[in-house]
């Protein structure tokens, strides 16, 4: 996904299904300048990763 879409999801009050590889993630922060996002993997709050936004995929419901 592009950085602008990651930012929209991050700022939205709605919930969107987002995946990193095969894992479901929550977007915790977006660094627009560098195109990076910090995500929480699954339901484990200590399992966070900072990845390029283009590695994230929005899953249609």
Image (cartoon, grey):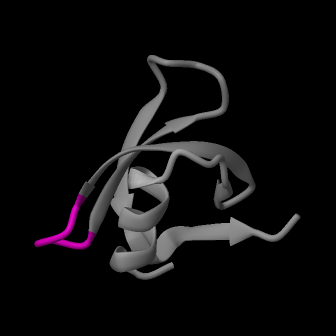
**In the rendered structure, which segment of residues is drawn in magenta?**
31-35
Name the residue at the left extreme.
Answer: 33
Residue 35: x and y in percent read: 25, 72
Residue 18: x and y in percent read: 65, 57
> Quick check: 23 above or below 2?
above
Query: Which quadrant of the figure contains the C terminus?
Result: bottom right
Q: Is 26 positioned to the left or the right of 37 in the image?
A: right
Residue 58 sits in quarter: bottom right
- 18 vs 9, nearest the viewer: 9
Was residue 14 drawn as part of the magenta stretch in this picture? Answer: no
- 21 vs 40, nearest the viewer: 40
Was residue 34 drawn as part of the magenta stretch in this picture? Answer: yes
Residue 57: x and y in percent read: 63, 70
At x 42% / y 82%, what residue is drawn?
2
At x 49% / y 59%, what residue is drawn?
9
Q: Main secondary structure of the magenta part?
A: loop
Q: Is 59 positioned to the left or the right of 8 in the image?
A: right
At x 49% / y 18%, what residue is drawn?
45
Tally of marks: 0
Q: Is 47 positioned to the left or the right of 41 in the image?
A: left
């Amino acid at each position: 996904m592009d950085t602008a879409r990651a930012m929209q999801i991050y700022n939205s009050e709605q919930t969107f299904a987002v995946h990193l590889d095969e894992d479901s993630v929550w977007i915790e922060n977006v660094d627009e300048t560098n195109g990076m996002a910090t995500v929480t993997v699954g339901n484990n709050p200590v399992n966070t990763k900072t990845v390029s936004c283009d590695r994230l995929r929005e899953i249609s419901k």
